[in-house]
Image (cartoon, rainbow, N blue to C red):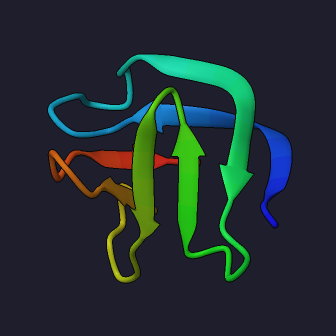
Amino acid sequence: MTISNLVYVELKSGYNDNGPAWICNVSYSKSRLMVYFNGKALRRIHGNLFSSHCDIETGEGYWN
């Protein structure tokens, strides 16, 4: 079972707080360590000041 929510998601890699952003429905894994949106799987990361999630395929940082 996944949990879905309407959230703000912003691409942080390669941008200085002006990257593309979306307000969209995302799905969370049961443990809430993975976020799924727009065909991407984002893994929760800790200790990064600029992003809270990382795309598991490309390594790009996202904030949500």
Above or below, comparing residue 18 to residue 52 in the picture: above
What residue occupies the far front of the structure in this picture? 1
Classify residue 27 as left or right of residue 4. Answer: left
Above or below, comparing residue 20 to residue 32 in the picture: above
Residue positioned 69% across, 41% down in the render: 26
Above or below, comparing residue 12 to residue 21 in the picture: below
Classify residue 31 as left or right of residue 19. Answer: right
Classify residue 46 as left or right of residue 27. Answer: left
Spot occupied by residue 13 in the image (x, y as percentages of width and height) = 21, 39
Q: How many marks?
A: 0
Residue positioned 57% across, 55% down in the render: 35
Above or below, comparing residue 45 to residue 40 in the picture: below
Q: Quadrant of residue 33?
A: bottom right
Spot occupied by residue 25 in the image (x, y as percentages of width and height) = 76, 32
Q: Quadrant of residue 12?
A: top left
Spot occupied by residue 24 in the image (x, y as percentages of width and height) = 71, 25
Residue positioned 49% across, 48% down in the render: 63
Residue positioned 75% across, 38% down in the render: 7
Q: Nearer the viewer, residue 5 or 30?
A: 30
The N terminus sits in image quarter: bottom right
Q: Nearer the viewer, residue 55 or 9?
A: 55
Spot occupied by residue 4 in the image (x, y as percentages of width and height) = 83, 48
